[in-house]
Each structure stands twice: as structure tokens, then as C-alpha cells.
Amino acid sequence: METLQEQINSLGPFAYWIALFIVVGLFVTVGQGFLKARKIQPNSFQWAIFRHEVFWSITNLVVSAFVLGGLSQFLRTNGWITFDQSPAEWWVILLEYALYFFAFDAYFYWGHRIMHIPGIYELIHKTHHRSMSPNLMTSVSVNPLESFVNGGFVPLFTAMFVVHQETFALIAPTNIIMGVYVHNGYEFLPRWWNKSWITKWFITTTFHDQHHRYFRGNYGGYTTLWDYAMGTVRPNYESGFEAVKKRTAANK
């Protein structure tokens, strides 16, 4: 008989989505006032865009599950992806995860900029940019080709580096969690976030929300490091973040 963990693993990414939507549904139900004060683009909902997102979310999830799931299974079956089963200290897991985190951040930044090149943009990325005011569904409202580019990094990374199983347990849901986080449309981080040298390098929802709203700039996926280094941070990013925080404070 399969254990609960084995049953969850068999569901793949869908298990994380099911859990996420349950949690978000409960949060929205009990925290409408809390959310309203933190909305980055108030009164921006459009039914036409929502219908577009529903169609592409379903299309993308179905196609990507088969393609990326099949690719990962093929690579594991043929020995291209293996995991270190030996016991590991916590700091080893942390280092392996940090390697993935910053490697994907670089991969996403440059891949994202390439997807904004005319011709490539229309083929791959335009579907996602139909959503100018992101919401939870926006994270998966993409052309499946874009999912292959971004989602393909995990099997590529695990084929290149043999990491511990515990590390993969952290890696697997990270893209999903970060995707939902940057597209949720609400700014939950504290007002001091962009004022601290330690935290300002990690992406905020406002950061990516502005990318959708203005189309150019703020290309990073996990951090703002590459945008600051390459001069692609939007000039109104920090003032935009501050504006949401002031509105939040005024509604307390």
C-alpha cells in the first residue's frame, strides 16, 4: 500500500496547486479587508482577461504536465537524473538549494529578456503579457512553450548536478510558489523591505507587477540582482512599492 507521501508525489505539481488553492481560498474568505488595502492595482479586474487566463492556464497545465513530466521520467529512467541518497547535513542541503536558486535566477533573467525580443515575444511570451494586472492564475496563464523554457530548468539542473533527495523536495515546489507569489497582485512585504541592504535584493510582488503593467524592465524571477546589475530596474519601482505601503498604513 502506498504511503501518503508516495500518493502526493504521484500527483506531481498538481498536489502543490491543490494545496495552494485551498490555502488561498481560505485566506481570501477571511481576509478581504486585509487584501483590499494591499492591492497593487485596485479595480483592475477584467472578465475578458480572466477568461483568457482560464483558457491558457488549463491548456498550459495539461500540456506541460505531459511534456515536462515525461521528460523528467525519461531522464530518470535512463540514468540522466539521479539523487544522492546518502545522509546530508543541513548546510549541504542549504548550499545545494542556494546553487539552484541563484542559477535559476540568472537563467530566468536572461531567458526572460530574450523572450521580449520581437519575433520571439509574439511566439512565446505574448500570451502571458495579456495580463497587465497579475493575479494568482496569471502565473500559469502562459503559452506551453514558455513553460517548457522555464520549467525545463529543473530537469536540466538535476541532470547536471547530483543533489540530495531532500534538496529536490525544496526545489520542486519553488518555481510554483515563487510564480504564485510574484503574480498574486498584493504586496505583503513590510515597508522596510526595500530600505534594508539585506532584503532589497529579493523580489517583491510590486517588482514583477510593474513588469506586467509597463511591459519593460524588472525582468528578474527570484531576485533583483541582475536587474540592478544590468540597469533594468524600473525607475519608479521603489516609489511604487512605497505608495502601496502608504496606502496600507492609511487603511489600518
Image: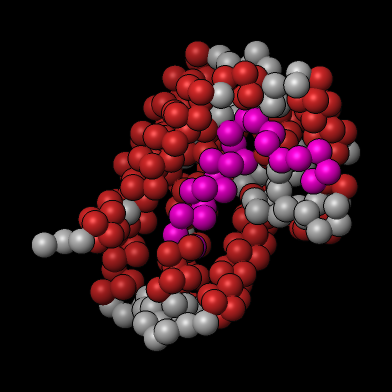
Q: Quadrant of residue 78?
A: bottom left
Percent of width and height locating residue 20: 43, 40
Q: Quadrant of residue 96?
A: bottom right
Answer with left or right where residue 138 lies relative to residue 114.
Answer: left
Name the image quarter holding the N terminus. Answer: bottom left
Q: Give me the residue at 80% from left, 30% from top.
A: 245
What stretch of residues is rendered in magenta?
171-193
Q: Is residue 79 above or below residue 174?
A: below
Q: Quadrant of residue 41?
A: top right
Percent of width and height locating residue 139: 52, 38
Q: Give me the residue at 56% from left, 80% from top.
A: 92
Q: Give me the residue at 80% from left, 25% from top.
A: 249
Q: Is residue 167 above or below residue 53?
A: below
The answer, for residue 127, to whether it is visible in the render is no
The answer, for residue 29, to whether it is visible in the render is yes
Q: Is residue 21 magenta?
A: no
Percent of width and height locating residue 110: 67, 57
Q: Is residue 181 magenta?
A: yes
Name the image quarter holding the C terminus. Answer: top right
* Of the pair 6 and 46, the residue shown nearer to us: 6
* Of the pair 217 and 237, the residue shown nearer to us: 237
Answer with left or right where residue 179 lies relative to residue 211.
Answer: left
Main SS of the magenta segment? Answer: helix
